Amino acid sequence: MTTFSDRAGTIILALVFVDELLAGVAAWIYGIHAGDRLLAAALVTMFVAAWWTFASPQAPLAGPIARPLVKALVFGLATVALWAAGQPDWAIAFLVFSVVINAVALHPDVERVAANAATSGRR
């Protein structure tokens, strides 16, 4: 049976994923603002590579220092990218959303839902 906490945890984890996608969009926006689609594609590729390597749930090089450091760098740089692209309101909104949703995701109930999803995905 699914409890409210399980449903809420799933929604929070989905919002964390949306936040990760938005960081990639911010990198793309900055690249386009700089006038180069190739730069935009390179920035998004670097973001995905860093995220997959250090911060994703199945990251091969994640650790107690690497994961939060890379998350802070990615979300911080995405905020700076939006600001530099002339979108200060979106930069602030993104930063607030990132901080809030990632802080809420640290709640034990949400971490339990994430752990359950990770173990059920390995079966």
Image (spheres, rainbow, N blue to C red):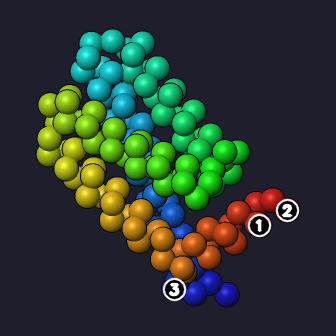
How far is disc 3 from disc 2 in space, using C-alphas?
25 Å
Quadrant for the N terminus, please. Answer: bottom right
Whole-percent x and y of residue 10? 54, 69
- Structural distance between the alpha carbons of marks 3 and 1: 19 Å
Secondary element at image label 1: helix
Query: Which amino acid type is shown beneath numbered disc 2?
Result: Arg
Crowd around label 1: few <14 · some 14–19 · many ≥20 (10 Å): few
Instruction: Classify 62 as above or below 45.
Output: below
Q: What residue sits right under mark 2 in the picture?
A: 123
Q: Does any portion of residue 22 appear in the rendered image? A: no
**Residue that lies at the very extreme toward the right in this rendered image:** 123
Q: Amino acid at mark 1?
A: Ser
Above or below, 22 against 41 in this view is below
**Amino acid of disc 3:** Phe
Asked whether, in this view, residue 78 is left or right of residue 2, the answer is left
- Which residue is nearer to you in this view: 4 or 88? 88
Asked whether the residues under the numbered discs 2 and 1 touch, taking CB atoms below 8 Å apart as contact, a structural biologist would say yes
Q: What residue does disc 1 label?
A: 120
Label located before the other in sequence (3 or 2): 3
Kind of element beneath mark 2: loop
Mark 3 / mark 1, whichever is N-terminal: 3
Look at 51% across and 85% down and name the residue there.
Answer: 4
Image location (x, y in percent) of residue 121: 76, 60
Q: Which residue is mark 3?
A: 4
Other residues around mark 2 within 10 Å, as few (<14) / some (14–19) / many (≥20): few
